[in-house]
Structure formats: C-alpha cells, structure tokens
Image (cartoon, rainbow, N blue to C red):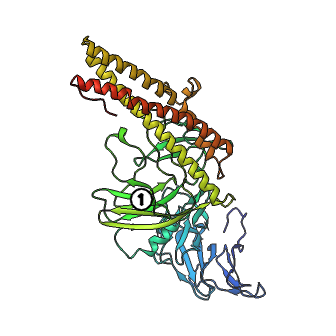
Amino acid sequence: MDTAGAGMYATVFSFMASAHKAGTLMTGSDDGLVHVTHNEGAEWTNVTPDDLPKFSQVTMLAESPHNEGTVYMTVARHKMGDYAPYVYKTADFGASWARIDSGLPASDFCRVIREDPNREGLLYVGTELGVFVSFDDGANWQSLQADLPVTPVYDLLIKDTDLIIATHGRSIWILDDLTQLHQLASRAASHGNHLLKPRDVVRTPDDLFAGFMESLGGKCYHVSIGQNATYYVDEHETGHKTKRLLDAGEDLERGARITYYLEAAAVDEAVLTIDDADGNRVDSFSSVIPEAKLDRHGLYITAVAGMNSFQWPMTYPAGVKMVDTEYHDRPGGPIAKPGTYTATLTVGDWSESQTFDLVKDPRVTTDDADLAEQFDLLRTIQDKLSDTATAVNTIRGLRDQLAAWGQRLGSDETSDHAAVVASGTELYQSLRDVEDKLVQRELTSPGDSLNYREMLFEKLSSLPPVVASADSKPTEQSYAVYKKLSGQIDAELETLTALTGTELASVNAELARLGHGAIGI
C-alpha cells in the first residue's frame, strides 16, 4: 500500500500489557488486526472487530485503569483516504467491541485514547487536529482544545491530575488541574452555582526576580540563571500579571486555582474569602473594581455567567501604601503556612465553601515549627514597614496642611500671625527631618537606589526577600538586622509622636486662639 515501497505492513503498531491480569497481552497492527494472549504469548487469539476494514492502522490500545478486561482502541484509515474517527471499546479483552466515536468530527482521524485514572469513564482522545473529552465513557464527545494549537496529538499521559499532550511539531503541552473536569462531570446533572474544590497545591516561594526590571508594554528578559527567555508582561483586569513568553515554555502558574461556575452574572458584589484552619481570615477578594484605576490595589475576581477562575498567590495581603510616591511598593504579605485553607464564594444570598491544602515541597525537610517562625518574622517586618508608611503618610498630610496655613496667614504681618507661621515653619522642618530619616524622597525610578542613599524604609524592605528566599528558619543575622533597623524606626516614630503631641498641639492652640480651624492628623 506504499507506492515508494519503503513501508512494509503487518507490523505491530500498538502493544498493551495488562496491569489487571498477569500474562495478558494485546497487540494492534498497522494492517488492521488485533490479537490477545492470556498466557504471555504462548497462544494468540485474533480479536479484530468484525466491522474494522482491512489495512486500518491500530494507533493505540489503552487498558482501563479501573476495570479488568476493558480496553479502548483508536484506529486511523487516512492512508486509505478515509479520515473518519474510529474509536472502540471492549469490556472482555476483545471478545466483543463497540464503537464509541459518536460526536467526534467526521473528518478528524484519531491517534490516541486514554481513560483518566482518577475518574472512571472520563476519556481523552488525541486526533490529527487536537484533543477531545468524553464525560460518559464515549457516549458523547466535546472539544478540549482551549489554547492548544491545531496540531496532531500523538500521545496523552495523565500525571497525577495534569494531562500531558505530545504533539507532532508543536512540542509538549500540559493541561493543568484535571480535578475541575472530574467535578464538572460529577455535577453535570445539577444546576445553579458551583464552587469547585481546589486541588492541593505545593507551597512554593515567590521568584526573587519577579518584577525586577520588568515593564508593561515592552519586551522583558529573564535574569535568573538558567532561564534565558524573552517575554511580555500582561496585566489583567483582575490585577493579576502574567508572563507571555516568546521563545520558551511557560511554567505552571504559581498559586492555588479557585474555579467556580455561575448560572448568571452577579448582579451586585461577589466576594471570595480565604480562611486558615483556625477560621482566621487570610484575605478577601471582591468583583467590584473601582472605576478610577488610581484607586485600584490588590486582586479582584470575575463574576460573569459561566466558568470563572481566580489564582490565589498563597500570600497574605499587602501592607499600608505610602502616598505621593510611585517607587515605594506596599509591604508584601508573607506566603501562607502549610495547612488546610477554606475558600468561600458569596454571591447575593448564595454561598459555598471548599477546603484545600497547601503542602510543603516534597524536597523540603524544614519542619512546620521553623516555617511558622519564618512566617512570624515576615509578618513582623511587614507590620513595621506598614507603621513606617503610615508615619510617612501622616507627616506628608501634616506638611501639606502646614504649608497651606503658612500661605494663608503669611500675608498678614501682625505679630500673632507671624508667630504662628514661625511655629508652623519650625514644625514643618522637624517633620521633614523625621521623614528624611524614614524614607528616601528622591527615588523617581527603579534604579535610583544606586544614586541616592537608602533610608530606613528601603533598608528594611530589602530584608523580607532574604528571609523568604528559601523554606527555612530565619538566620540569626536576619533577626539582628531587623532588631537594628526596627529600633531606629521606633526612635523616629517616637519623635513623630512627640512632635504631634507638643509642637502640633501648640500650633493648633494658637490657631484656635486666633479663631482658625485646627490641623488634623
């Protein structure tokens, strides 16, 4: 059947060794014959389906991981000019066969079939053009293409709860988290909103170089050793940022994927909350995004009709943002500790909760007590950075008010007004002195820390990446650095408290005596 004469037929093209019954083997050839043996090849029986034409190519024999005797088979006849799909199932090692390809495209021949080892009757078929799924053991099929390119799929492998796809010419692709398909199949007959149970997630520290020298709207380059790749950073409406790589494969997106189905779009607000095992609130996320983008911070969820998903980064919320600055990030929250967490989705009067676990990287031997100590130190550092940002925000608010009162009263040269203006000017400078010790005001770009001296906020901000760089107990040096910097910050915060309790009170008393309003904190 080969005009070039290079290919000789009657070749075993697919081979299956039963995992259920020792000594049972099954073969499929490229000229359309299927044989089985139950005694390790001593005797073979022809079990070719009666309706399988000659010179068909048996592309795959796949035993069910659930039931002895059940084997699935894909057959291709494109070399004979027949591009139809042929998919068979036997429940008795080939004694009888049934076609199960109804619903597959009429001109898309099949190369591979697999049954999900985690759910009986959930089938995946790879064709010349893509991937299809059946939730009912082949009675019905639908596309599972998603963003997979149109490409021949030569093999499929279910690893844990991921589907690995081997294509011909378009590399290897992975469909992450099949647990969503498992649950959708189980709940297909029900109606209404569903919060699917998230799968357990390996707790991994954030990339130390994430965000380093990245920019929106232009090409970025990995700086980590061993990761040479060019990519764009895409910012989504939910606040998530993802990398779109141009010359490399994508890593599994970090975090816990929370998937939910809404029968109708949320009319008002939808809220997703994350609680720890003790019922303490970790974080919450709303579907309501402020219209003013400048007011946006954090992450948001979608609440549209149909399937929605949210990627929780496994971290606690960020701390207090410093106003009037673009290059001082909010103090980031630490990564959550290993343990059980509860996701709760609330839409109107409806609510549903599901639990999932954050598990340690199996390569990590650090015990939970040390990870808890690391978490506590990171939270302590975050709180101190937030205290610093709050103090700077207070100072800047007071300085703005003092400057405004100075301009308002400065045109009046009476002794009373001149005295309060002088007191206000002195307080203004004292506040500026505290601010300049807490934060470097001259930072106007990410690289300015090379040109201007880092102050207490910048110095302490450099400590969390060190503490969180590995799943390990904090070092003594980390505690020493925190103790030194936090002590210096506390001294400035005490100075600020004294200024607002004495000098500011004095200025306000003078303003009140003159019949003017007070300067508020």
In this rendering, position of residue 304 left or right of residue 3: left
Q: Visible in this render: residue 55? A: no
Q: Which of the 4 image quadrants contains residue 463? A: top right
The x, y position of residue 361, in whole percent, is 64, 59
Q: Residues within 10 Å of mark 1 (few under 14, many from 20)?
A: some
The residue depicted at 54 percent of the width and 26 percent of the height is 448
The x, y position of residue 231, in whole percent, is 55, 41
131, above or below 297, in the image: below
Q: Which of the 4 image quadrants contains residue 486? A: top right
Q: Which of the 4 image quadrants contains residue 34? A: bottom right
Given residues 10 and 278, the one toward you in this image is 278
Q: Quadrant of the N terminus?
A: bottom right
350, above or below 398, in the image: below
Instruction: Give the amino acid at mark 1.
Output: Thr
The residue depicted at 24 percent of the width and 13 percent of the height is 412
- Label 1 sits on residue: 273
Given residues 175 and 399, the one toward you in this image is 399
**Residue farthest left in this picture:** 515
Q: Quadrant of the C terminus?
A: top left
Say what secondary structure mark 1 lies in.
strand
Q: Visible in this render: residue 174? A: yes
The residue depicted at 39 percent of the width and 64 percent of the height is 261
The x, y position of residue 168, in whole percent, is 62, 58
466, above or below 101, in the image: above
